[in-house]
Image: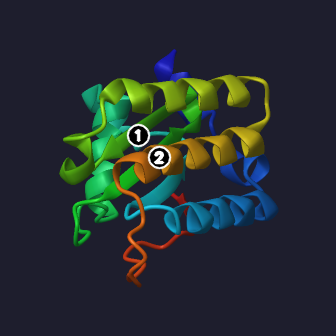
Amino acid sequence: MRWIRHLAAGARVRRLFPRAMLDAIHKAVAAGEHRHRGEVCFAIENALPLRDLARGRCVRQRAHEVFAQLRIWDTHANSGVLIYVLLAERAIEIVADRGIAARVEQGEWQAVCDRMRERFAARDYELGAIEGVTAVSDILAQHFPADGSVRENELSDQPVLL
């Protein structure tokens, strides 16, 4: 059944996340990053690569791989956070760099994923994505508030389509 979901996923990203919605997510990431010292990346993937399906890889493993591929770990303060959406499995994972993971419990991230999943299940992808980005920014603002200094935007705020 898993193979069928992935093979049938097609190009749903563009249908479920049209350009205007991607722009709204981009703006939410940028606005959130003014409130904290973290770097947020929102990535969407239709389906796992076939090699990952054949190996039986789980979504969490793929999220960690994407985290590395996009170099989210390579921020100055180890403050990168990935919001990873896998459409074929209706899965959402949040992966935080070690500087953040040391302070934020996995349960906080899981609550954000659960809320996003509820919105997506109701077919409200834009609200789910924006609420997810805002919730991640809220957590980061609590643990890593902005200090007023000018800082470089180390990761693009534009959502990544894989």
Residue 70, horizontal then vertical, whole percent: 34, 63
The front one of 161 and 29 is: 29
Residue 53, horizontal then vertical, whole percent: 36, 31
Q: How many marks do you count on the picture?
A: 2
Q: Quadrant of residue 37?
A: bottom left
The front one of 55 and 74 is: 74
Q: Gap between marks 2 and 1, in whole Å?
A: 5 Å
Question: Which mark identifies residue 20?
Answer: none
Q: Secondary structure at mark 1?
A: strand
The residue pinned by badge 1 equals 94
> Which residue is the extreme one toward the top?
1
Could you tell me which residue is drawn at 19 percent across and 49 percent down?
98
Say left or right for 126 vs 41: right
The front one of 92 and 30 is: 30
Say left or right for 154 vs 88: left
Question: Which mark identifies residue 83?
Answer: 2
Say left or right for 1 vs 140: right
Residue type at mark 1 is Ile
Count neighbours of disc 2 (C-alpha within 10 A) and say few if under 14, some if 14 to 19, many if 20 or more. many
Q: Is residue 10 visible?
A: no
Count neighbours of disc 1 (C-alpha within 10 A) and say few if under 14, some if 14 to 19, many if 20 or more. many
Q: Quadrant of residue 135?
A: top right
Could you tell me which residue is drawn at 45 percent across and 43 percent down?
139
Residue 99, horizontal then vertical, whole percent: 20, 52
Are circles 2 and 1 on residues that touch, CB within 8 Å? yes
Could you tell me which residue is drawn at 76 percent across and 64 percent down?
19
Q: Secondary structure at mark 2?
A: strand
In this rendering, the answer to whether 118 lies above or below 49 is: above
Q: Earlier in the sequence, mark 2 or mark 1?
A: 2
Residue type at mark 2 is Ile
